[in-house]
Image (spheres, grey):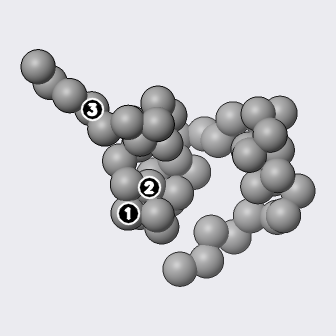
Amino acid sequence: MDLSISREALSYYENGKRSPDVDMLVLLSKYFNVSIDFLINGKEFNQN
């Protein structure tokens, strides 16, 4: 799966200079096989 983003855009995401939009979060969550909650918070959503 190709995310079709530049290295520069990825670097901005990694360094907190830019935040991905919702569509990109969906692509990233599918690519890394994690939830969007995990991408945002670093942990899975807990409903309790």
Label pair 1/2, CB-CB below 8 angstroms: yes
**For residue 44, which quarter of the picture?**
top left
Q: Secondary structure at mark 1?
A: loop
How many dots with numbers?
3
Q: Is residue 17 left or right of residue 37?
A: right
Q: Is residue 10 above or below residue 42?
A: below
Amino acid carrying label 2: it is Ser
N-terminal of the two: label 1 or label 3?
1
Which numbered disc covers residue 45? 3
Q: Nearer the viewer, residue 15 or 5?
A: 15
User: In x, y percent, where is residue 12?
Assistant: 82, 44
Q: Given the image, on which type of amino acid does mark 1 rest?
A: Asn
Q: Give me the residue at 69% from left, 35% from top.
A: 19
Position of 20 compared to 37: left or right?
A: right
Where does residue 7 sit, x and y in percent of width and height? 84, 64
Tell me where residue 45 sits by quadrant: top left
The first of marks 2 and 3 along the sequence is 2
The amino acid pointed to by label 3 is Phe
Q: Quadrant of the C terminus?
A: top left
The percent position of residue 30, horizontal first and vertical second, equals: 41, 63
* Residue ID for mark 1: 33
- Write down the residue under mark 2: 29
Neighbor class of circle 3 (other Cα within 10 Å; few <14, some 14-19, many 20+) is few
Tell me what residue is drawn at x 50 percent, y 59 percent.
Answer: 27
Q: Which residue in the rendered view is the most extreme toward the bottom?
A: 1
State how far apart marks 2 and 3 are (Cα). 14 Å
* Residue 14 can be seen, yes or no: yes
Would residue 23 be visible to someone looking at this image?
no
Residue at the (52%, 47%) spot, across then down: 25
Element class at badge 2? helix
